[in-house]
């Protein structure tokens, strides 16, 4: 005799296909949770290593990102107008809950916490994405290869934007896959929910990195094709959600253009302003490698992606396997939305060729380090596509070469783990880049920081904040500084530095040095600080604030 409620209990039991170990199916929350917990442990171990060795603040961009976030809560005119107009705002906004704590600003933890969370979310999302293309064990192997990548782990302990963008890229691709499946199966409720989430993620991508603008456009095009060309009968049920999705997708770029127009009187200031990539490239590296040469740009970027993804010269094999897996997945009509993971490739090829974004890596001329970290954005595409090919090979060999097929999975899993160990032993290229490019900056900012700490507490300081790391190390509140983002007060200080600040710090060639040269009245030079590879800093005291400083 069947007990009451047993039919309901039986209905909840999964069928055999849902629990089979070699079936490609969406991952459940129960499967994903242990991987997310493991990612959390790995993330905190990575943070402990980076923090103990002083790696959190090696990237000048990481210091600058935290400086922007700090200005929002601590400056002479705090508020969202301190976000600037070149770097997109979401990474800085996510730091706000942590940046007001002076100690966390100084040691870099304020930028590490959001990146660690994004790493954990990225690993969980990657596994769920892989499960739509791979069986459980091959999904696990691909996730190990992705999650244990030392370059990604290091960036996930810093204030850099790559971990956030990767999390958005992975989840946006996953949700696009789920939306496509919902449309294919006629599940209008699921499709509507995915549209809303995709709208939010598209907005987040647009406000994180400029490749997010291309990603957003690609997502919108994919969704629009699915809605109108394949399942027109769903339109009446998902139309309001599609409109919301489209509004969110369009609101991001329009909002940023409006912000630049309001603050800098030029909607394209981020493209052509004095702090844009084009202006920096003109000043420091005009005519960089790959300029107006898409083929060489593709070589540069794919080689950078190989060095980021794999140890020694095995990156060539990983790239070849990934390209083969991509072609195979497209031919098999397997989750073609996974093509979104490859968006960084055309974006950076164009950016290197025509967008003033140089990438320098040791194997190729000019044999140095600059922006090699951009290669990490190809890591999800390489991991899932390469392991898709390996899974396909295992299935093919299972018919005639059973032993080889059985050995392929443990070999691939072991090589993925050994790859991480080998990269850590040789120092990941992203960490090498950070070390190489921070030597002179760190020494200069440390010396300047010690001098800033000698000033009387509360003294007003005029200093252009390109070297905000010195202020960060000194632990001085930014509200004491007149530094270039105060609008009227900044313009007034430039016309009479001695009247507005007790101390003036002028770097060669910056606006403060020009102001001092034009209006030296009332200033006494105290010291000149110079280090190799950096502009000298001249420090002045205002004679009109002499009573304050004694």
Image (cartoon, rainbow, N blue to C red):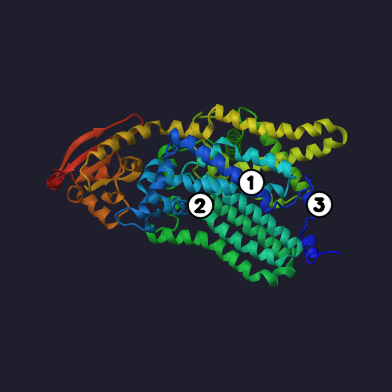
Q: Regarding mark 3 in the picture, which secondary structure is present there?
A: helix
Give the CA distance from mark 1 to mark 2: 28 Å
Name the N-terminal-most of marks 1 and 2.
1
CB within 8 Å, label 1 to label 3: no
Find residue 495 and report its horizontal and vertical position in percent.
21, 51
Instruction: Using the image, determine if residue 92 lies above or below residue 303.
Output: below
According to the picture, the residue beneath numbered tag 1 turns out to be 34
- Characterize the local packing of mark 2: few (<14), some (14-19) or many (20 or more) Cα atoms within 10 angstroms: many
Kindly identify the residue that appears in the image at 61 percent across and 34 percent down. Answer: 306
Find residue 516 and report its horizontal and vertical position in percent.
22, 43
- The residue lying toward the viewer, choosing from 9 and 63, is 9
Mark drawn on residue 17: 3
Q: Nearer the viewer, mark 1 or mark 2?
A: 1
Q: Nearer the viewer, mark 2 or mark 3?
A: 3
Name the N-terminal-most of marks 1 and 3.
3
Q: Residue extending furthest front?
A: 1
């Amino acid at each position: 005799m069947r007990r009451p409620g047993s039919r309901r209990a039986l209905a909840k039991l999964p069928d055999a296909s849902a629990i089979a170990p070699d079936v490609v199916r969406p991952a459940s929350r129960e499967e994903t949770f242990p991987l997310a917990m493991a990612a959390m442990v790995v993330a905190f171990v990575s943070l402990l290593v980076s923090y103990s060795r002083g790696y959190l603040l090696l990237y000048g961009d990481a210091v600058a990102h935290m400086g922007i976030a700090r200005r929002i809560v601590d400056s002479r005119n705090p508020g969202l107008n301190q976000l600037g107009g070149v770097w997109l705002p979401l990474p800085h906004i996510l730091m706000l809950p942590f940046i007001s704590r002076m100690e966390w600003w100084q040691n870099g933890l304020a930028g590490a916490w959001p990146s660690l969370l994004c790493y954990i979310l990225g690993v969980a999302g990657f596994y769920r994405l892989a499960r739509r293309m791979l069986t459980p064990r091959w999904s696990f192997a691909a996730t190990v290869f992705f999650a244990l990548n030392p370059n990604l782990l290091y960036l996930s302990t810093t204030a850099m934007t790559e971990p956030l963008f990767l999390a958005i890229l992975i989840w946006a691709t996953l949700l696009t896959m789920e939306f496509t499946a919902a449309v294919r199966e006629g599940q209008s409720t699921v499709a509507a929910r995915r549209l809303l989430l995709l709208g939010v993620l598209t907005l987040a991508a647009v406000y994180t990195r400029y490749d997010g603008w291309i990603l957003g456009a690609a997502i919108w095009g994919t969704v629009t094709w699915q809605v109108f060309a394949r399942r027109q009968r769903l339109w009446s049920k998902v139309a309001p959600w599609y409109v919301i999705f489209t509004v969110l997708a369009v609101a991001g770029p329009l909002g940023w253009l409006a912000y630049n127009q309001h603050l800098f009187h030029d909607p394209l200031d981020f493209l052509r302003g004095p702090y844009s990539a084009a202006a920096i490239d003109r000043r420091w590296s005009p005519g960089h490698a790959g300029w107006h040469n898409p083929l060489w740009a593709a070589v540069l970027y794919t080689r950078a992606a190989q060095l980021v993804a794999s140890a020694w010269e095995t990156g060539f094999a990983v790239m070849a396997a990934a390209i083969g897996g991509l072609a195979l997945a497209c031919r098999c009509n397997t989750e073609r939305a996974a093509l979104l993971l490859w968006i960084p490739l055309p974006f950076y090829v164009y950016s290197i060729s025509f967008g003033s974004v140089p990438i320098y890596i040791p194997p190729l001329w000019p044999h140095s380090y600059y922006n090699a970290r951009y290669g990490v954005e190809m890591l999800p595409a390489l991991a899932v596509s390469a392991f898709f090919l390996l899974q396909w090979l295992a299935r093919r060999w299972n018919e005639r070469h059973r032993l080889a097929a059985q050995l392929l999975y443990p070999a691939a899993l072991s090589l993925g783990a050994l790859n991480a160990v080998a990269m850590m032993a040789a120092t990941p290229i992203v960490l090498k880049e950070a070390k190489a490019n921070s030597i002179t900056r760190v020494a200069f900012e440390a010396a300047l920081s010690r001098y800033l700490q000698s000033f009387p507490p509360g003294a007003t300081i005029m200093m252009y904040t390109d070297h905000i790391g010195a202020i960060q190390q000194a632990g001085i509140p930014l509200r004491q500084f007149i530094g270039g983002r105060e609008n009227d007060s900044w313009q007034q200080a430039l016309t009479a530095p001695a009247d507005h600040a007790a101390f003036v710090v002028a770097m060669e060639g910056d606006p403060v040095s020009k102001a001092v040269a034009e209006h030296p009245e009332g200033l006494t030079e105290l010291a000149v600080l110079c280090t190799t590879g950096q502009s000298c800093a001249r420090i002045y005291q205002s004679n009109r604030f002499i009573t304050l400083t004694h």
